[in-house]
Image: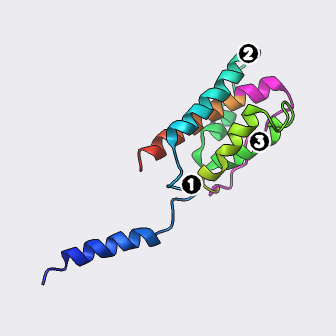
Amino acid sequence: MNSLPILHLLLFLLGFQAPQAQGRSLSTYQPKQYLKMIDEIMDLLNTSPSPSEETLDPNETNILLNTTLLRPNLDAFLNATKNFYNKESLIWKNLKEFLPLLPNPTSRGEPIYIENNWDDFQKKLKKYLEALHKFLLRTSTEF
């Protein structure tokens, strides 16, 4: 007796019982939509006065590019956005859309500290969006 068709059926049914990927709903995840939101934020950041030529501290860069800190860093940027825009701003709205996509933090590392000035916010958010963009591209190829 050939059990291959039964095995396929069991694997198919198991797929419905398997938990969804951590942090995102597979049925609603649309990478192009989220990449467009990142571009919209970058456009706003680039039309604002440019940040100073001062570069980020290497430790800050590591924190911003660390994929295990994507969610805590997003929370930090959402909180900092309130200092520069009201909650109805496009930056705040777009950033908030990423919350369900990002996995819960597994690292004990500290999120990025954002000073209460536009220059620091702008510089760090640009670097964070770079990491978020790479994360979305990597996860979109997994599906």
- Circle 2 Cα neighbour tier, 10 Å, few/some/many (<14 / 14–19 / ≥20): few
Q: Mark 2, mark 3: which one is toward the viewer? A: 3
Q: Earlier in the sequence, mark 2 or mark 3?
A: 2
The answer to which quarter of the image holds residue 41 is: top right
Which is nearer the eye, 87 or 121? 87
Q: In which quarter of the image is the N terminus?
A: bottom left
Q: Compared with residue 93, is residue 27 higher up or lower down, i.e. above or below?
A: below
Q: Residue at x 53, y 42 (%)?
A: 135
Q: Which of marks 3 and 1 is nearer the N terminus?
A: 1
Q: Which residue is drawn at 77% across and 15% down?
A: 49
Q: Position of residue 79 (x, y in %)?
A: 81, 42
The residue to which callout 1 is attached is: 24
Q: Mark 1, mark 2: which one is toward the viewer? A: 1
Q: Answer left or right for 85 relative to 28.
A: right
Q: Answer left or right for 58 relative to 115.
A: left
Visible in this render: residue 57? no
Label 1, label 2: how many angstroms apart (C-alpha)? 33 Å
Task: Give, as a single range, the part of the protein colored magenta.
Answer: 105-123
The residue to which callout 3 is attached is: 78
What's under tag 2, amino acid-wise? Answer: Ser
Which is nearer the eye, 49 or 88? 88
The residue to which callout 2 is attached is: 50
Is disc 2 in contact with disc 3, using a CB cutoff of under 8 Å? no
- Circle 1 Cα neighbour tier, 10 Å, few/some/many (<14 / 14–19 / ≥20): some
Residue located farthest toward the left when viewing the structure as drawn? 1
Q: Residue at x 64, y 27 (%)?
A: 40
